[in-house]
Amino acid sequence: MRARIPRLLLLAAVLAVTAGCGFHLRGSGGPTFAKGILLQGIGSSNALYGDFSTALGLVGGRLVKSPAEAAGIVHVYRAYHSRRSLTLSRFGRSTEFDLFYRIVYDVRTPEGEVLLPRQDIEVRRDYFNDQTLPLAQVAEEGVMRTEMQQEAAQTLLRRAISALNKPPPGKS
């Protein structure tokens, strides 16, 4: 019985300290974004649309269908993957690649006022392919492209929210 009381006190002390430290799991607690965003320029069948929608949902927002419902409009002009060879083997085959994913976009109010002028987000990855497992190379590149696209969608969302939360010029 005596050994049990100090353990309970220790457990209570640890819980009290960690409860007030500000640590939260991603997606639990913290600030939320309860406004709708309209994503224009890409269709709902585009993977970026799904990644952006997922990221927006994690912060408490949602994609809307019309400017009247939107707190802001993100217009995507271009979103594309590209790959280039960096090095060649002694047999003339590419062994190292530079992958990148680029999004060109702007952020506007529903009234059309530009909050963030046209700019781009670029995510890059380098990877080495030793030519011994060609199927593994295709799978690895596919995973990297998906991760790059998700990272770009999250960056696009952070920039859009930041632009929408800034007071308009002249109203500060």
Image (cartoon, grey):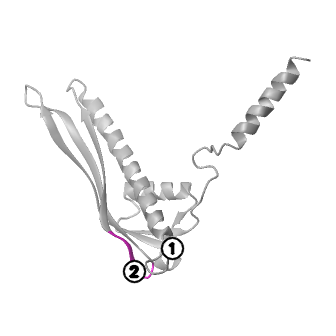
The residue type indicated by label 2 comes to Gly
Q: Residue furthest right?
A: 1
How far from the left and from the top, in percent, is residue 129?
23, 30
Classify residue 80 as left or right of residue 4: left
> Which of the 4 image quadrants contains residue 31?
bottom right
Residue at which label 1 appears: 71
How far, Cα to Cα, is label 2 from label 1? 11 Å
Nearest the camera: 50 or 60?
60
Which residue is drawn at the image coordinates 43% and 53% (left, top)? 154
The residue type indicated by label 1 comes to Ala
Nearest the camera: 12 or 155?
12
Circle 2 Cα neighbour tier, 10 Å, few/some/many (<14 / 14–19 / ≥20): few
Residue 10 against residue 115 in the figure, above or below: above
How far from the left and from the top, in percent, is residue 169?
43, 78
Could you say whether the residue bearing mark 1 is in a helix, strand or loop? loop
Which residue is drawn at the image coordinates 28% and 55% (left, top)? 102
How far from the left and from the top, in percent, is residue 138?
28, 36
Residue 121 against residue 94 in the figure, above or below: below
Nearest the camera: 156 or 18?
18
Which is more N-terminal, label 1 or label 2? 1
Quick check: marks 2 and 1 in contact, CB under 8 Å?
Answer: no
Could you say whether the residue bearing mark 2 is in a helix, strand or loop? loop
Residue 125 against residue 63 in the figure, above or below: above
> Which of the 4 image quadrants contains residue 49?
bottom left
Classify residue 36 as left or right of residue 30: left
Residue at which label 2 appears: 112
Which residue is drawn at the image coordinates 21% and 38% (left, top)? 97
The stretch of residues the image draws in magenta is: 110-117
Which residue is drawn at the image coordinates 69% and 38% (left, top)? 18
> Which of the 4 image quadrants contains residue 6?
top right
Classify residue 4 as left or right of residue 121: right
Circle 1 Cα neighbour tier, 10 Å, few/some/many (<14 / 14–19 / ≥20): some
